[in-house]
Amino acid sequence: MTSTSSPDPSARAGRPRASLPLVAVGIAGVVLTVVGGWLLTRPVVAWFAYAPLSEHALVPSPRPSLAGMVALGLGCALWGCVVGSVLGRRREARAGGDA
């Protein structure tokens, strides 16, 4: 009698499947990129004293927020890690299939 076992889905079509941590890092990269972009587009809000008593006018600076820059940079770095990992896996799969 011949056993009929189902083939491994990752071996189908010669492509490795994405691992759960890789997908999680990709999702975190998307979220951080969106949050960073959103924070960088928010207007600058500041507290100020009553103008006639302080003798200074509030001039909001156009500087972007530090949290926005960090979130955007970290999100882009995570995207770079995911893309590098995917390209590395494809290269390994091609090298393994050609040999």
Image: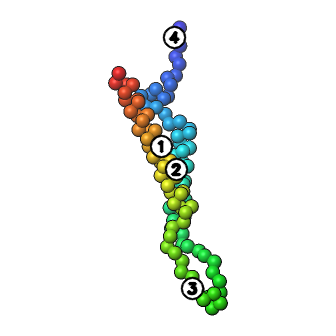
Q: Which badge, 2 or 4, is on the more N-terminal residue?
A: 4
Q: Which of marks 3 and 2 is in front?
A: 3
Amino acid type, label 3: Ala
Amino acid type, label 2: Gly
Q: Are marks 1 and 4 in contact (CB under 8 Å)?
A: no
27 is higher (above) or lower (below) than 2: below
Locate residue 53 relative to residue 90 in the image: left or right: right
Q: Are marks 2 and 1 in contact (CB under 8 Å)?
A: yes
Q: Nearer the viewer, residue 86 or 1?
A: 86
Q: Nearer the viewer, residue 44 or 56?
A: 56
Is residue 34 in view? Answer: no
Measuring 45% from the left and 46% from the top, which residue is drawn there? 80
Q: Nearer the viewer, residue 4 or 71?
A: 71
Amino acid type, label 4: Thr
Which scheme is used to colour this image of the protein? Answer: rainbow
30 is higher (above) or lower (below) than 41: above
Report the residue marked by disc 1: 82
55 is higher (above) or lower (below) than 96: below
- Which mark is on residue 59? none
Report the residue marked by disc 4: 2
Report the residue marked by disc 2: 29
Report the residue marked by disc 3: 57
Q: How far apart are marks 2 and 4 (CA)?
A: 47 Å
Amino acid type, label 1: Val
